[in-house]
């Protein structure tokens, strides 16, 4: 089992300070662990003794043994075809670029699987399921649609869920309502957006809990976020990929659906009933749905009137 597996599989229970080291290692694995104890401690915001206790908790006698294991993983990875993906980016004119790009996306997803401690993901689910919290979703210029994706699903599962979008003025106006116990899910990837950072900081100062989705270089929002979920954004393109971030979002939605099964079932049933009444989707156009008469669309009613 690799060190990264031990950091993410949940078998080792880390203290809050040790989790800072875990996140630092996973954000730049394995390079973050190949420097001195003092460097790792400083980058994670903990003390040198905390790093040494962390290494012992992983089963190593000391930091040199820990680094030796990391170097062995590096050597093994250098011989892996996956490690060559970034160095072998073809031009768009190359044959099978479509297949190559999807393979790069699979590689990014595999990296994302190993970048989040299981405890952090569980904490994000707990925050989303908190019945006493209102949920707000925020993203940047490109990542805003991820916030919208999370909001669109979450609002079906629970009430008091809001998407912060629109103009900057519209977004800032939401700050007047943010308070303690509220949860702000925020997406921020390089190049980190100043307006997103300022909004999240103000929300934190007002007592809101911040759940951050970010890349392996880690947004400055992580300094005050309660939970940080990192992912890979590297792909065979000059633009960062959001495929792993979408997968993280959908994983959270799936887990929340299971967690809120009893509470959300009646809510979803009521939503479906309303949608049938208003013929929102094509299946509601059938005369009988689930044994109930649906309301015909307006055009059908008008045509019938004209034929009389």
Image: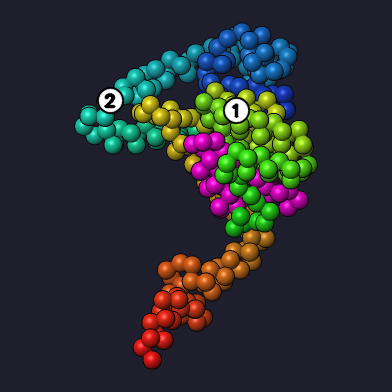
Q: Position of residue 125 (x, y in %)?
A: 64, 45
Please name the residue shown 60% across and 47% down the image: 163
Q: Is residue 54 visible?
A: yes
Which residue lies most toward the bottom here? 308
Q: Quadrant of the C terminus?
A: bottom left
Compute the Cα span from label 2 to label 1.
Answer: 34 Å
Q: Is residue 294 left or right of residue 118?
A: left
For marks 2 and 1 on the same chain, the one whose residue lies earlier in the sequence: 2
Quick check: 208 left or right of 104? Answer: right
Q: Secondary structure at mark 1?
A: helix
Secondary structure beneath label 2: loop
Give the extent of the magenta segment.
126-154
86 over 121 or under it: above or below: above
Query: Would residue 183 be visible to someone looking at this image?
Result: no
205 sits to left or right of 113: right
Q: In front: 223, or 124?
A: 223
Which quadrant of the view contains residue 35? Answer: top right
Disc on res. 194 = 1
Q: Count the numbered circles shown.
A: 2
Residue 167 rendering spot, x and y as whole percentages: 57, 41
Residue 43 position (above or below residue 182): above
Q: Nearer the viewer, residue 238 or 18?
A: 238
Q: Residue visible at 58% across and 49% down? A: 151
User: Percent from the top left, x then y, of residue 149?
Assistant: 53, 48
Q: Residue at x 24, y 34 (%)?
A: 96
Does 250 lie within the magenta span?
no
Instruction: Report the residue marked by disc 2.
Output: 90
Res. 229 mark: none
Asked whether residue 133 is drawn in magenta, I would say yes
Q: Classify mark 1: residues with Cα within 10 Å, few (<14), some (14-19) or many (20+).
A: few
């Amino acid at each position: 089992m690799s060190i990264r597996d031990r950091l993410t599989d949940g078998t080792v229970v880390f203290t809050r300070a040790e989790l800072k080291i875990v996140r630092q290692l996973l954000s730049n694995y394995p390079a973050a662990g190949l420097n001195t104890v003092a460097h790792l401690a400083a980058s994670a915001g903990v003390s040198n003794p905390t790093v040494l206790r962390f290494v012992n908790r992983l089963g190593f006698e000391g930091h040199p043994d820990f680094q030796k294991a990391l170097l062995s993983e590096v050597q093994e990875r250098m011989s892996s075809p996956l490690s060559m993906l970034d160095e072998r980016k073809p031009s768009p004119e190359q044959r099978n670029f479509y297949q190559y790009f999807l393979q790069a996306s699979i590689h990014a997803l595999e990296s994302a699987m190993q970048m989040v401690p299981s405890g952090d993901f569980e904490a994000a689910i707990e925050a989303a399921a908190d019945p006493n919290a209102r949920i707000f979703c925020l993203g940047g210029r490109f990542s805003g649609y991820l916030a919208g994706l999370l909001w669109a699903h979450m609002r079906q599962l629970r009430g008091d869920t809001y998407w912060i979008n629109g103009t900057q003025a519209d977004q800032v106006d939401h700050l007047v309502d943010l308070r303690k116990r509220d949860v702000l899910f925020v997406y921020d990837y390089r190049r980190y957006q100043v307006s997103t950072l300022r909004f999240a900081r103000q929300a934190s100062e007002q007592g809101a809990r911040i759940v951050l989705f970010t890349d392996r270089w880690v947004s400055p929002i992580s300094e005050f976020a309660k939970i940080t979920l990192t992912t890979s954004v590297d792909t065979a393109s000059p633009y960062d990929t959001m495929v792993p971030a979408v997968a993280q979002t959908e994983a959270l939605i799936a887990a929340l659906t299971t967690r809120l099964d009893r509470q959300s079932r009646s809510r979803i049933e009521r939503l479906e009933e309303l949608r049938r009444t208003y013929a929102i989707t094509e299946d509601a156009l059938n005369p009988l749905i689930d044994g109930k008469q649906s309301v015909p669309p307006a055009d059908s009613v008008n045509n019938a009137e004209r034929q009389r």
